[in-house]
Image (cartoon, rainbow, N blue to C red):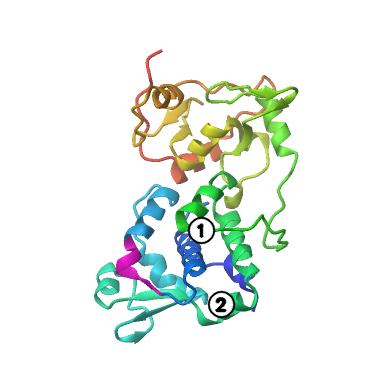
């Protein structure tokens, strides 16, 4: 059985680029718990708050419930659910999952495969991360679910995985003249830029192309905040700051809150700005709630 292919082809709602990472998040959480206790079960009532937190942090902006993946992941053959009544999920209703003592864990065949090949766990995790989340969030997401991974395995799943274009970074940084489009940071060590990254506006995991008009040159801080939905791009190509962001320190105000309403820096004349389709995808699928009012100059 090809467990990597199963992980890559989890059945998820995926219409018009809609993000639905519920199953990958639960799967990653289960892998993290498996590392600590290979025989343990995840009782829904005990892990519900953890899963709610993951969905709030890494899921789509709209509200959702962890009961959905807890029930539906069973249909992908990688997860099993038992209740006080016996094997099988009682459904996706929160009340039923709680009342019946529903508990889930990785499917028996998958647990057996992981015992035979411990390195499989890391490869599964990297497939789930790569196909549902941008690289800027991988490390902190692993920490959030308690996963400890070895250095990245090279896993070729063609035609499941597209290959990234390694030239995108240089093309995007050149288009933005090696400065962060949000704050203008332009640090370098000698002739080498440091702390500058090429961010996908529409995530590569959701068919975002490796094109300049789907990229932004961002400093490391603002890249992370952009992928978390704290920052976004407005209709006038200005910086949006989520009204949910709270930062009381002078540093938070200077580096985040004060960006609200500022025009993007770049790209240079002749380079393509962020395409409306990609900006719209980020606004709907990543940016959190409404924007804060523009900050007075």
Residue 95 position (above or below residue 274): below
Magenta span contains residue 196: no
Residue 75, given in percent of the width and then of the height, sits at 47, 76
Q: What element carries label 2?
A: helix
At x 35%, y 64%, the residue is: 47
At x 56%, y 77%, the residue is: 110
Residue 18 in view here: no
> Callout 2: few (<14), some (14-19), or many (20+) C-alpha neighbours within 10 Å?
some
> Which SS does the magenta portion mostly show?
helix
State which region is magenta: 41-48
Residue 65, given in percent of the width and then of the height, sits at 34, 60
At x 47%, y 61%, the residue is: 13
Q: Nearer the viewer, residue 90 or 116?
A: 116
**Quarter of the image holding residue 5?**
bottom right
Which dot marks residue 14? 1
Which is nearer the N-term, disc 1 or disc 2?
Answer: 1
- The residue identified by callout 2 is 110
């Amino acid at each position: 059985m090809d467990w990597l292919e199963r992980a890559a082809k989890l059945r998820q709602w995926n219409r018009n680029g809609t993000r639905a990472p519920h199953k990958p998040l639960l799967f990653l959480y289960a892998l993290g718990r498996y590392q600590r206790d290979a025989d343990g079960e995840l009782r829904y009532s005990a892990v519900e708050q953890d899963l709610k937190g993951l969905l709030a942090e890494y899921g789509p902006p709209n509200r959702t419930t962890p009961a959905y993946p807890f029930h539906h992941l069973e249909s992908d053959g990688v997860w099993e659910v038992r209740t006080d009544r016996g094997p099988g999920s009682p459904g996706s209703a929160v009340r039923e999952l709680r009342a019946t003592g529903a508990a889930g864990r990785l499917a028996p065949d998958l647990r057996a495969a992981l015992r035979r090949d411990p390195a499989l766990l890391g490869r599964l995790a990297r497939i789930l991360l790569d196909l549902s989340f941008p690289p800027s969030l991988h490390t902190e997401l692993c920490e959030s679910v308690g996963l400890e991974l070895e250095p990245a395995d090279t896993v070729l799943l063609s035609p499941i995985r597209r290959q990234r274009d390694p030239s995108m970074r240089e093309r995007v940084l050149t288009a933005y003249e090696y400065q962060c489009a949000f704050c203008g940071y332009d640090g370098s060590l000698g002739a080498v830029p440091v702390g500058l990254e090429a961010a996908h506006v529409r995530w590569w995991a959701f068919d975002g192309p490796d094109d300049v008009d789907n990229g932004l040159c961002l400093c490391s801080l603002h890249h992370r905040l952009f992928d978390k939905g704290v920052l976004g791009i407005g209709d006038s190509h200005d910086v949006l700051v989520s009204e949910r962001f709270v930062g009381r320190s002078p540093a938070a105000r200077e580096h985040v809150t004060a960006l609200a309403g500022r025009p993007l820096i770049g790209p240079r004349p002749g380079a393509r700005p962020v395409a409306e389709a990609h900006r719209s995808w980020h606004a709907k699928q990543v940016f959190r709630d409404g924007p804060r009012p523009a900050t007075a100059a």
